[in-house]
Structures are given as structure tokens and as C-alpha cells.
Image (cartoon, rainbow, N blue to C red):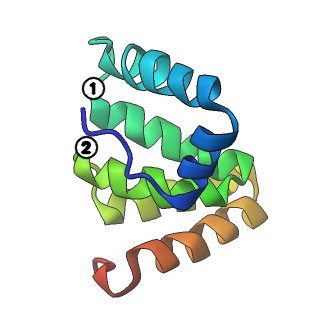
Amino acid sequence: MTQPKNPPAKDIVRRIAPKFAQLGNEILYGDIWERPELSKRDRSLITCAALVALGRTEQMATHFPLAIENGVSQAEIVEMITHMAFYAGWPAASSAAVRASEIFGAELDD
């Protein structure tokens, strides 16, 4: 699996909490993401939905592009955001839509 790109926040976490970063790399990305019961595509879509539900817009910059690498289309991410509006709330979905627009920019699918 391709691990998420290293945004500045991840570098900061690695410097301030190296054990936390190590556990994430070894357990989350080295074990959990490699389990065969869910595809990486499904794990990415689930992760993105959780980020929308929790309002974790900063982490979307890592996980939305990773989801695309793992086979989720931009249109599917946008549809997931729309769907989540009715489960996680309109404000969470609105914030996620704005963040998706920032992340995808001109690359946004029609």
C-alpha cells in the first residue's frame, strides 16, 4: 500500500511524538490497512466518510488523494460527502465539500 504523503502536520507529529508516528506506521498502515477482509479502496472510502462525520478536514488533505490512489473516484468522494450530510449533518458535509474543492482544485471531475 502506498502510505499517505507526508504533509507538514505529519512531519510535526513525527518530531513531537515519534512513538505515536511509529505506531501509526506499523499498526495502522502496516497491519490494519493490509488485512484482506476489506480492500484498500473500501478502507479509503470508510476512512473518508469517518473524517467527514467527525469534521476532520485537516486529515482530508491526506486521505482524499489516497482514496483516489486506491481506486475511489472524485465523483464517488463527492457523492459520499452528499450522502454523509444526512447522517453526519449538513455542516460537516458542507465543510468537507469546501475542503474537497480545495484539495482537488482544478482537477475536480465534472
Disc 1 target residue:
39
Relative image position of residue 24 (x, y in whole percent): 52, 26
Relative image position of residue 109 (x, y in whole percent): 28, 77
| Three-letter residue code for mark 2 | Asn
Q: Residue at x 54, y 56 (%)?
A: 60
Q: Residue at x 29, y 31 (%)?
A: 40
**Residue 83 lies in what quarter of the image?**
bottom right
**Vertical arrangement, residue 43 with respect to residue 26, above or below:** below
**In-front residue for pair 101/85:** 101
> Circle 2: is it few (<14), some (14-19), or many (20+) Cα within 10 Å?
some
> Circle 1: is it few (<14), some (14-19), or many (20+) Cα within 10 Å?
some
**Vertical arrangement, residue 35 with respect to residue 47, above or below:** above
Question: Which of the numbered marks, if any, corresponds to residue 70?
Answer: 2
| Three-letter residue code for mark 1 | Ser
Left or right relative to 89: residue 32: left
Left or right relative to 6: residue 20: right
